[in-house]
Image (cartoon, rainbow, N blue to C red):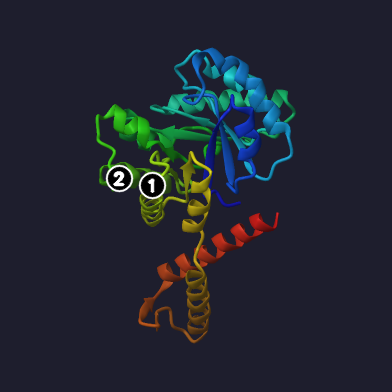
Amino acid sequence: MPYRSFLFAPGNHPRKVEKVFNCGADAVILDLEDAVALAEKEATRSLVVDALKKTRSAKGYVRVNGFDTRFCYDDIAQIVGPWLDGIVLPMVERPGQLETISWLLSNLEAGAGMTKNSLDLIPLIETGKGIAVLDAIASAKVEGRVRRMAFGAGDYTNDLNIHWSLCEDELQDARARMVLQSRAHDLEPPIDTVWIHIKDADNFEKSSLNAQQMGFQGKMCIYPPQVDVVNRVFTPSDSDVIFAKKVVAAFEAAEQSGSSSIQLDGYFIDYPIVAKARRILENMTDIQGQNEN
């Protein structure tokens, strides 16, 4: 299925949680971390589980509290069950954190009668230490449980005392590393950071386009109107699909005549270009299948 849009909602706001699954996002992240005050964290766990048990059209994830907090273990132990699709683990800075949480999830899955590795684990990389050891994090020994990583610019820019500008040039290095290490370790393309200027739709779309062009597969959202923008940006356009079909058809015809490089509408076409065209068509098929469901 496509993972274009991940929409956050505070787990302790029942009205927001009730609405969030109907906003068109591919996945929803119910938050137990930053959006929930310390005094409410423990009580919010049961609210999150109740919400996930209801009929919904989007995947259901929970962002738990960080590995080094006193809340992390009980967060996970109390929310795991067949109603959950995955965990978002914040502030990941070393592979051992993922390996420990993966071990815990495997035991909880077994206790709940679930298939091993049925729960997705998404590490949220949002500190200088995390980016610095991204190679080790991406190669953590978790038996395929980590399928994609996510980038968090809010804590990252705070950690490094970086000014988070509207153009986001200061994020380019971290973003590039996320994409490179994901590919180097056979993970799916990563998920991009949230955009905090919720009324600035123009620059939000630019941020989304930049992430898409850099190789991310989707973006996290904190405001429901952002979902439509993200879904559109990370969905191949009609012209992209039409051209991809032309590329594949023309190349297959050329191959039958013994050629593996051709020109089409002013473009030089060879195997890498065809592979990208086929990926566009596969992505579009996945999105259409999701929409039908």
Q: Amino acid at mark 2?
A: Leu
Choose between 32 and 96: the one closer to the eye.
32
Q: Which residue is mark 2?
A: 166
- Between discs 1 and 2, the one toward the N terminus: 2
- Residue 56: mark: none
Q: Is residue 40 above or below residue 163?
A: above
Q: Is residue 80 above or below residue 165?
A: above
Q: Secondary structure at mark 2?
A: loop
Relative horizontal placement of residue 205, taking residue 173 as reference (left or right): right
Residue farthest to the front, as pictured:
199
Is there any visible trace of residue 82 in the rendered image? no
Q: Where is residue 147 shown, x and y percent of the image?
A: 52, 42
Q: Where is residue 21 shown, x and y percent of the image?
A: 64, 41
Q: Where is residue 29 shown, x and y percent of the image?
A: 56, 35
Relative horizontal placement of residue 149, taking residue 121 as reference (left or right): left
Query: Where the C terminus falls, by quadrant?
Result: bottom right
Residue farthest to the bottom, as pictured:
257
Labels 1 and 2 touching (C-beta < 8 A): yes
Q: Which of the two discs, 1 and 2, sits closer to the camera? A: 1
Q: Is residue 220 above or below residue 103?
A: below
Q: Dot 1, how many residues are within 10 Å of its Cα: few (below 14), some (14-19), or many (20+)?
A: few
Choose between 283 and 154: the one closer to the eye.
154
Q: Secondary structure at mark 1?
A: loop
Q: Dot 2, how many residues are within 10 Å of its Cα: few (below 14), some (14-19), or many (20+)?
A: some
Real-space Cα separation, disc 1 to disc 2, in angstroms: 9 Å
Is there any visible trace of residue 169 in the rendered image? yes
Residue at 50% from the left image edge and 58% from the top image edge = 232
Q: Which residue is mark 1?
A: 200
